[in-house]
Amino acid sequence: MAYASDERDANNVVWSGKWVAERLGVELDGDERLRGLLGLALRRNPKRAHLLVSHVLGKHVPQSPALVWRSGYDLGVRVRALLGDDEARRSVVLGYAETATGLGHSVADGLALAPYLHSTRRPVPGVARAGGFEESHSHATSHLLLPEDPGLLAGDGPLVLVDDEFSTGNTVLNTIRALHERYPRGRYVIVALVDMRSDADQGRLAEFAREIGARVDLIALASGTVRLPEGVLERGQALVAEHEQSALVAEHEQAAASVPVRQSAVGVPVQRDARRPVRVDLGWPAGVPDGGRHGFTAAHRETLEAAAPGLADRIAGALPADARRVLVLGFEELMYAPLRLAVALEERVQAEVRYSTTTRSPVLAVDDPGYAIRSRLVFPAHDDPADGPGDRYAYNVAGGGFDTVVAVVDSTADTPQLHAPDGLLAQLARHAEHVLLAVVPSHVPGAQAVEGASERQENPSMLPEPLRGPAFSSYAPDEVGWLLQDLSEVELEAPTEEREEAIQSGGAHYAESLPVEYQPNEQYQQLFKAALETSAARIARAVGVVTETVLAERSKRPVLVSLARAGTPVGVLMRRWAEHRHGLDLPHYAVSIVRGRGIDANALRWLAAHHDPADVVFVDGWTGKGAITRELAQAVRDFEEASGAEGFDPEIAVLADPGSCVRTYGTREDFLIPSACLNSTVSGLISRTVLRADLVGPDDFHGAKFYRELAGTDVSGHFLDTVAARFDEVGVAVDAQVKEVLSADRAPTWEGWAAVERISASYGINDVNLVKPGVGETTRVLLRRVPWKILAQRGAGADLDHVRLLARQRGVEVEEVDGLPYSCVGLIHPQYTRGATGADGKAVTGQ
């Protein structure tokens, strides 16, 4: 039957092809299902003015993800029935970029027994082409086939080709012809949502099958024909030109508006402040590709299906409590992963969930119920495309009534352009109250994981996603992301005395190995607990002061980047304060900095790609003499000179600044911060960081170990919870102290450095690196190095109880002195050898 332009469906909803049909005389003939499956729109294209807009493809029209997936799945079930299980196992499913990548994958799900591959317009360096073909009517014509397994297309089993529509058949026939010459086979199955061939094209398929000597079958949800009157191309182009200018003016005015706007459910602009997106760590299953660009096997499918509920739970946990209408928005060729996330999410939340994806294809938007593309968002490409920069689009998002949008991209596309003021995330923030970002790691064919390291990304400059608990560290996944590689399976520990001798002789750097983790006895554990109980309120006050100072002076939504590992508990506490006091969900990462070798440049590169460097605030526990402060400043300068990236502020925010080295601090008193008393068991069970050439390559993050075996003595959570429980009681004191701090002269005096130089000279050490001032640094000397003696401020009280206990256990003299600007100072044995001190590591006094 033919659909008249004024027909409505059974629910009295105007057909979304009515507007084009009325103006151009375009009609659809065929199955009754066609109007439910398709609408019409116009595009600027010299070969075809009209666009068939699918309601079940999940590209241009937000739709129930279950309906989108089921449409492809059911077609796959029909293919399996057609072929039989034996032939199905020998088959390969091939989908078309970009619109049919998710559809093809869903068909492969229904077929169940076959691997899946989709064509791509993204070349990947080092990956050989297994073929390619042209799509003559598309705005971007070249397709590449880049299977990881070169033999994927070489078999003689059936090839199942999946596209959203089968119109002239040229694209599919070009594909078969190109592949048949290289990989001849006896059977092909063409799958499409709709078969829209004209009468003239109907006989071409059978003729083509005879030509190549193979059987070619066709399966579709519905079939019909588009009736195009004479001159439709010219009239369509004129119609596009007429409406496009006004649409562009409106888009540019909106993008330039000083106050972001969003559309209400009825299309009325509503002003509001744009918010930064909330990043959701998916915990994507290891070894599962992001899609079918390089092949996706039945085993991959099983792993993803098992993991999907957990992935969706992470998204559900990040949704606002009052979410009503949620859009999961995929990215160009990345359609399947977002679709499966959306399907699982739809099953788990009360909110209405819809799914669609962004696209390269420019289509005219007309806000009319009889037109399939009601609105469009325009934003720059954000995956460094091979054909250069250009505009990209998201349709029917504005005005869709979505209060929450979950943007899902692959890591190759998680770039500064994505986060730019005119980028996709900013555009979405103008139209939805809440924007979440989930990143799926891009798969790299042939990339071999370094022992304990994360998989490389497609672009060498793209690095792995942060490690998170519980897989890495005992912290909750939202508390901190570690920009490190996991070296847990590598033997790195060496006896303290061996390390000291190697370090002082110049034979090794302290970051090339790890000390054996100190295991506190019962007496020491009781000291820790008592110290924590005594100092919790004091620490909470310092956390509040430093966090409020950062929010007042550095950024309204800072990105906390703690220096692993002493800074990490402080960063977590600052994040908790911001959430408790202001409802802010601040991103927090931990990075490695190594004295003498600088900060992890790859971590800075990752941060610059994912956040505005101006928002990054480096966090540490305390300052001693200021060596790390100076190290960071130099490292940031070196990084910016080498990479061209700018904007990082190297000043550290610390809990305690007894050395007067920084402007942003919670206090300048040298007091016991109980997290300094222990090693990994108060820092998420993570070791000190490691930088060694045979383990850390030029494109790797620095490394660290996760001591899972110490879980029984882990007090990381106890430390955080004890301090955070005191936030309310110190609130008034924090507010008063912050006012004083903000109005005070906080210029660093570096008095700590001067004191260290005096001590170094007075004790004949002549190496400031062997003088460790402050409670925290002194504790580290006793736990990790070979101490010579401890200098303690005369009359220092309970803050040094744990220091005195450790000194007795190590046989180290504690010398009380006057005029010390710190509570204590630890002196490392100068010119250490095991012969000078004895193999047990106990210090020799009087030297």
Image: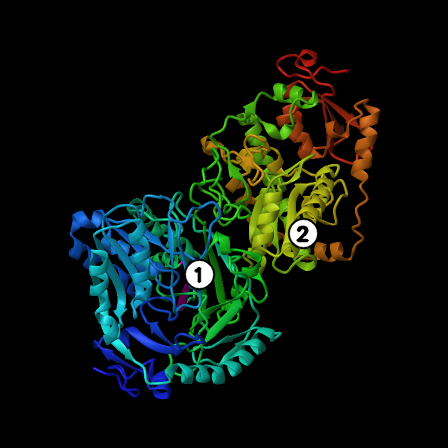
Our reading of the magenta stretch's main secondary structure is strand
613 shown above or below 823: below
Q: Nearer the viewer, residue 117 or 54?
A: 117
Label 1, residues with CA under 10 Å away: few <14, some 14-19, many ≥20: many
Name the mark on residue 331: 1
Could you tell me which residue is drawn at 49 percent across and 65 percent down? 434
| Count of marks placed on residues | 2
Q: Position of residue 289 (x, y in %)?
A: 39, 48
Per the image, the residue denoted by label 2 is: 644
580 shown above or below 135: above
Could you tell me which residue is drawn at 79 percent across and 46 percent down? 748
Q: Quadrant of residue 222?
A: bottom left
In the image, taking residue 376 as reference, residue 589 lies left or right, namely right
113 shown above or below 260: above
In the image, taking residue 607 as reference, residue 184 lies left or right, namely left
Q: Is residue 410 visible?
A: yes
In the image, taking residue 80 as reference, residue 661 lies left or right, namely right
Q: What element does badge 1 sit on? A: loop
Q: Amino acid at mark 1?
A: Phe
234 shown above or below 389: below
Q: What element does badge 2 sit on? A: loop
Magenta-tinted stretch: 325-334
Task: Identify the image's colour scheme: rainbow, by chain, secondary structure or one colour.
Answer: rainbow
Q: Position of residue 148 (x, y in %)?
A: 38, 45
Q: Position of residue 107 (x, y in %)?
A: 27, 58
Q: Amino acid at mark 2?
A: Gly
Q: Nearer the viewer, residue 724 or 15?
A: 15
Q: Position of residue 439 (x, y in %)?
A: 46, 54
Label 2, residues with CA under 10 Å away: few <14, some 14-19, many ≥20: few
